[in-house]
Amino acid sequence: MSIPAVPHGEPVFEWAKLLGPFLLPGLTTAIVVGGFSLLFNTRLERQKRTYSEDLLRLGTDLNKSLQKELENDRTLRTEALEKQKRAYSEELLRLGTDLNKSLQKELETDRAQRTEALEKQKRVYSEELLRLGVEFNTSIQSRLETERSQRTEALEHLKRDLQDTLAGRSRRAEYLKAQLSALYGPLVFLLELCDIYFQTAYAINETASAISRKGGRQGISAFLNDTEVEAWLASTNRYYRLATESNDDALKFLRANWNWLDEDDRESAVKFVQDVVRTNVEFREVEPRRLSSDFYSPELLGSEALELPAGRRRDFIIQMRNKLYTKQRELSGLTGAPETSQPACPAEE
């Protein structure tokens, strides 16, 4: 509590008189209360020390008692556990022994049963394998017999086919020989001979034309006299006559041996025969039968004009020549004779 300040000009004793009645009771009360508080605290401290000592003693006694109880209980528990362990060990040992004996007995029984079952199964498998082996051997034997029979039959067929083939090759070779000697060989010779005559006549005429061009306006007369001109014309006509005679001989061969002609050659052979016959009738026979030149004039008749017969048919000559060489190669292949190289066909003029 703050002491009120003394008013300025007031005496101190006056204020002391005024404050006295208030301060004395408060001080008395504070002293009484402090004394009782001190006494209470002192007694409280003494009780606390007494209670603490009692509690300490009780705690010590309780700890000693609990320690002793725990020691006794641990000993009892240890002994009980040892007894229980021994009992459990003995029981486990007995159970293990009994279990081992039971398992041993069951294993021996099961082993005996398995051995017996395996023996039975082995006997069944052996019998089944034996049966399958017998059936397999029988099947293989039957199949081998069938295949042997089939192979024997196939070999017989192959022998017959080979004999037929050889016989067919032999017949084909004989036919080709007869065909070549009867028709194609002589025919190609006559056609080649005709071609040579025509080529020679053509070469002579080409040479005469060259001489005529060298003579200028006088022509061939500048170099050749009348006798030489007649000799040139006679030689050329002679070659043409020889060519037509060769065609006549070829026609005779075709007439006599037409049955040896291959089917694919007949159309061109007919055209060749037609040209030879027309040449003989329209140009070589007696004069009154010769047709007028107007019959052959495309300028007069257009497409309706007669086509001049060919003195030689280059396409027919080449066709027959190729057919002869083809048949010769085929015959050499059938008979095993070495093939002879044939000259290339000359280009058509």
Image: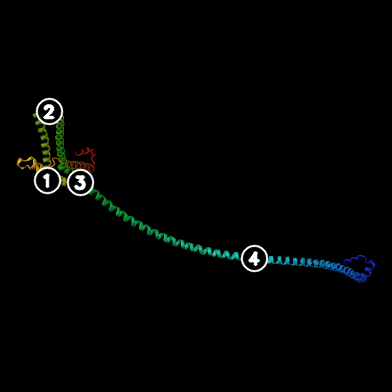
Report helix, strand or loop for mark 1: helix
Q: Is residue 135 among the parts visible in the rendering?
A: yes
- Tell whether label 4 touches label 3 (CB within 8 Å): no
- What number is the disc on residue 92? 4
- What number is the disc on residue 301? 1
Can you say whether 207 is above or below 270 in the image? above
Q: Residues within 10 Å of mark 2 (few under 14, many from 20)?
A: some
Residue located at (59% from left, 65% from top): 101
Question: Closer to the N terminus: mark 1 or mark 4?
Answer: 4
The front one of 153 and 166 is: 166
Question: Closer to the N terminus: mark 3 or mark 4?
Answer: 4
Q: Residues within 10 Å of mark 1 (few under 14, many from 20)?
A: few
Which image quadrant is residue 247 in?
Answer: top left
Can you say whether 300 is above or below 130 in the image? above
Report helix, strand or loop for mark 3: helix
- CA distance separating discs 3 and 4: 109 Å
Percent position (x, y) of residue 111? 53, 63
